Amino acid sequence: MLEDLRTQGFLSGKDYTISLGKCDRCGTVVEPRLSTQWFIKIKPLAERATEVVENGEITIVPENYKQIYLNWMNNIHDWCISRQLWWGHRIPAWHCSCGEIIVAREAPQKCAKCAGSELTQDTDVLDTWFSSGLLPFTTLGWPEKTRIRKFFYPTTLLITAYEILFFWVARMIMFGCHFMNRHKQDSLIKQASGWCEKKDDSVPFRQVYIHALVRDAERQKMSKTKGM
């Protein structure tokens, strides 16, 4: 087509430089593609996670990051939790040949709509930050009410960088407040930790300390992908 336009003298103009997205790891062009994704209705979880920071159950240091956190939580959007990767926790959803989709804790034996047994689990996996957000309590035996959970949940201090305040810290707070609701820490451990005045033991930690990042001479972040 271009050659025909040139031959007939219809092609005019100049070359333009465009922004072309490429993968950091392999360098291939990233092309947008519409596909079905899984989302979490995140506002109910965010409201509880906002409350525990506002009422002082969790303290964020330095203080300015508290307002940054609250601004993000108050303007939050539903969270796309599905990823098209070959590793990770599989989305707990099964597809039947009749078109029915079944979301369940355990693998279903038959379709609730047509009673068919040809069920295929969704190939997508959970977002890494979804899985990471479960870390504070799943490592302590949840959903069982273990002795170790009564001892070590919640922890006293989380030290992390500002860049994952939303990616990880906020998700841990949201999930902790939801899945550990009504949890009570061992009273002796709580007294020894110095946080007896705190009432809510569903939070994953009492205090978040935000530190700066180590950067190179060009002020770029340390990156495994870039070999730094």
Image (cartoon, helix red, strand yellow):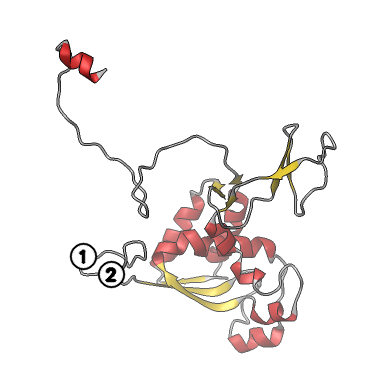
Residues at discs 1 and 2 in contact (Cβ within 8 Å): yes
Residue at 53% from the left image edge and 47% from the top image edge? 84
Q: Which residue is mark 2?
A: 215
Res. 78 in view: yes
Label 1 neighbour load within 10 Å: few <14, some 14-19, many 20+:
few
Residue at 56% from the left image edge and 64% from the top image edge? 132
Residue 117 placed where, x, y %?
81, 41
Direction from residue 75 to residue 176 in the image, left or right: right
Residue 11 placed where, x, y %?
17, 17
Dot 1 falls on a residue whose secondary structure is loop
Marker disc for residue 110 = none
Direction from residue 32 to residue 105 in the image, left or right: right
User: Callout 2, which amino acid?
Assistant: Arg
Query: Of 50 and 162, which appears nearest the observer?
Result: 162
Residue at 69% from the left image edge and 66% from the top image edge? 180
Residue at 53% from the left image edge and 58% from the top image edge? 128
Quarter occupied by the N terminus: top left
Label 2 neighbour load within 10 Å: few <14, some 14-19, many 20+:
few
- Could you say which quadrant of the image residue 88 lies in? bottom right
Identify the residue at the far right of this view: 115
Query: Of 211 and 80, which appears nearest the observer?
Result: 80
Dot 2 falls on a residue whose secondary structure is loop
Quarter occupied by the C terminus: bottom left
Q: Is residue 12 above or below residue 212?
A: above
Res. 185 in view: no
Residue 103 placed where, x, y %?
72, 46
Q: How far apart are the two marked residues, 1 and 2, measured between alpha carbons?
A: 8 Å
User: Callout 1, which amino acid?
Assistant: Glu
Q: Which residue is mark 1?
A: 218
Direction from residue 181 to residue 57 in the image, left or right: left
Q: Is residue 146 above or below residue 223?
A: below
